[in-house]
Image (tube, rainbow, N blue to C red):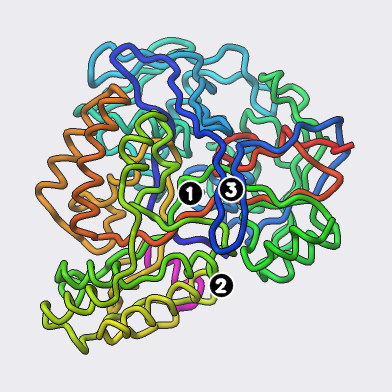
């Protein structure tokens, strides 16, 4: 499946006036819900030796390997091992230098990045400031069509200021921009290869020339993608333990579970929740859970319809049986969500997680109270249309639960079946939202900074699917985004979260840890969502 999501553009930790690497970690967690025990930790046991190769299962074939267009789990899962960013997010959600060895902020609107010396691309050429400038500017070019382009909305200029130095000028203070440079917006590729490949770049016909621990060997369209070890990789701590990795594409959830059980796939992320119990009891490997910044939410798409009345949005939220939804949609591995941005999104300053997220009240089901609100709003019998899709079992399960909850409180909830490709279009094409009131999203941050999520509810933002607008919210967000101190910014983000919870442009439902299955012959994989940008395949090796 391709998991729908709020657009997530940023990735690292914001910093104070003199920038240095900053970090935030999530502590291992555990829980019991729906009868399922689970523990969350950032890594699997370390590898005990090298491997010739291993096979990794993706739930879909990447639609591109162009870093500027990679905007979903399958392409980013592959690219994380081939291309790298100026900054890096580690498995425990800490921020460290990547291709930029250090950075400074001489004033609130200037960032200066010093590049790591003697870093080689896969063709043996050495990375320079020219490559960085070309890579970043390409994302800003409308001709590229990058969904990450809005990450650069405050950027006035990106210039080479030395052989290994790049200076970025902002039009206004923007705490989130620096964070973006650990996700796709901060990717560095060979400028020469971009020019040489042209329209073939990122396609099965083209080649990639990056700096990561693996290089692209072959993309057999419709069958597999093979990476080979980069023996000349600059980071000696992450030299690949395997000589090659083969990615296979299995869209059917049951077939994917069978691939794990049969050993035709050694492992894979985002394991189908319906297979959790089967895989746990199979003796064929380990089902592990890692840190996640994602939450399953209901995004309101139409504020001129039934859900335009805040009382109706509150009523629908109150009517949801979140604990049973966790059982049915997440295999019992998860918890009801307290806010639109998940707990894991608050990991930038761990103590602030306890202060601003853990203290939020648990959502309580109150059908009688919800029905009363619907009556007060004179919405009894009014229609609410929610999109559903065969893209993923979780979507149909949650859509059915929303329908049942809505009908119980007097709303006429209609399910609108949408084909998988069309479902994805809801998040990029306003025309695809016509006639819909609600859509199920898997909103996640690329960073442990919750402000990243909440930027997409600001008036006019590309990710504000329902065109919700609240002046108080916009002012609170803008204030937080001008604060470069992470702890102070977290305090300001709490106000943004408060308004979002009060007004419910997005209704939080549940959050679940990230999942990975490792067959008995391999180990060493990071377990969490940072696999989207961290070179996770490099750490996988033999289990014995």
Disc 3 to disc 1, C-alpha distance: 8 Å
- In the rendered image, residue 98, in percent from the top left (x then y), is placed at 54, 23
Q: Residue at x 27, y 66 (%)?
A: 300
Q: Earlier in the sequence, mark 1 or mark 2?
A: 1
- In the rendered image, residue 189, in percent from the top left (x then y), is placed at 55, 32
Q: Residue at x 55, y 14 (%)?
A: 116
Residue 357 in the image: above or below residue 431: above
Helix, strand or loop at label 1? It is loop
Q: Quadrant of the C terminus?
A: top right
Disc 3 to disc 2, C-alpha distance: 27 Å
Magenta stretch: includes residue 101: no
Q: Residues within 10 Å of mark 1 (few under 14, many from 20)?
A: many
Residue with the mark numbered 2: 393
The span picked out in magenta is: 418-427
Disc 1 to disc 2, C-alpha distance: 26 Å
Helix, strand or loop at label 2? It is helix
Q: Earlier in the sequence, mark 3 or mark 2?
A: 3
Single out the mark in the foreground, 1 or 2: 2
Residue with the mark numbered 3: 65
Q: Quadrant of the N terminus?
A: bottom right
Helix, strand or loop at label 3? It is loop
Q: Residue at x 28, y 87 (%)?
A: 412
Residue with the mark numbered 1: 69
- In the rendered image, residue 162, in percent from the top left (x then y), is placed at 42, 10
């Amino acid at each position: 499946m391709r998991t729908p999501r709020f657009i997530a553009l940023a990735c690292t930790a914001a910093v104070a006036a003199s920038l240095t690497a900053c970090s935030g970690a999530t502590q291992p967690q555990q829980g019991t819900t729906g009868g399922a025990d689970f523990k969350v930790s950032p890594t699997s046991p370390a590898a005990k030796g090298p491997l010739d190769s291993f096979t990794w299962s993706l739930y879909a074939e990447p639609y591109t390997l162009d870093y500027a267009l990679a905007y979903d789990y399958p392409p980013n899962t592959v690219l994380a091992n081939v291309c790298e960013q100026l900054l890096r997010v580690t498995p425990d959600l800490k921020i460290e230098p990547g291709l930029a060895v250090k950075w400074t902020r001489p004033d609130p609107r200037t960032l200066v990045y010093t590049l790591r010396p003697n870093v080689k691309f896969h063709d043996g050429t050495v990375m320079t400031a020219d490559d960085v400038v070309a890579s970043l500017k390409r994302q800003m070019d409308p001709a590229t069509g990058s969904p990450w382009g809005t990450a650069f909305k405050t950027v006035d200029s990106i210039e080479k200021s030395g052989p290994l130095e790049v200076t970025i000028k902002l039009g206004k203070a923007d705490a989130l921009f620096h964070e973006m440079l650990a996700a796709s917006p901060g990717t560095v590729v060979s400028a020469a290869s971009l020019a040489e490949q042209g329209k073939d770049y990122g396609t099965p016909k083209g080649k990639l020339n990056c700096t990561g621990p693996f290089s692209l060997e072959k993309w057999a369209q419709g069958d597999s993608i093979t990476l080979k070890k980069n023996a000349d990789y600059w980071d000696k701590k992450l030299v690949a333990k395997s000589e090659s990795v083969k990615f296979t594409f299995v869209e059917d959830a049951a077939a994917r579970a069978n691939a794990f059980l049969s050993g035709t796939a050694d492992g894979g992320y985002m394991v189908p929740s319906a297979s959790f119990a089967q895989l746990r009891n199979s003796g064929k490997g380990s089902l592990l859970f890692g840190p996640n910044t994602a939450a399953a939410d209901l995004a309101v798409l139409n504020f001129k319809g039934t859900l335009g009345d805040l009382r109706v949005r509150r009523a629908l939220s109150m009517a949801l049986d979140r604990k049973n939804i966790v059982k049915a949609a997440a295999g019992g591995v998860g918890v009801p969500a307290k806010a639109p941005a998940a707990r894991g999104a608050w990991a930038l300053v761990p103590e602030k997680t306890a202060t601003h997220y853990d203290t939020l009240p648990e959502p309580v089901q109150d059908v009688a109270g919800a029905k009363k609100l619907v009556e007060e709003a004179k919405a009894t019998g009014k229609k609410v249309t929610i999109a559903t899709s065969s893209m993923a079992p979780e979507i149909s399960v949650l859509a059915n639960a929303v329908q049942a909850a809505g009908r119980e409180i007097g709303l006429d909830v209609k399910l609108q079946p949408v084909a998988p490709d069309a479902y994805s279009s809801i998040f990029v094409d306003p025309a695809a939202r016509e006639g819909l009131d609600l859509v199920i999203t898997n909103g996640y941050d690329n960073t442990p900074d919750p402000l990243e999520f909440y930027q997409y509810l600001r008036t006019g933002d590309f990710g504000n699917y329902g065109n919700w607008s609240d002046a108080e919210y916009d002012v609170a967000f803008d204030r937080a985004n001008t604060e470069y101190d992470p702890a102070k910014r977290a305090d300001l983000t709490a106000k943004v979260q408060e308004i979002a919870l009060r007004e419910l442009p997005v209704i939080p439902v549940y959050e679940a840890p990230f999942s990975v299955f490792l067959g008995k012959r391999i180990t060493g994989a990071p377990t969490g969502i940072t696999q989207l940008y961290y070179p996770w395949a490099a750490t996988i090796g033999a289990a014995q």
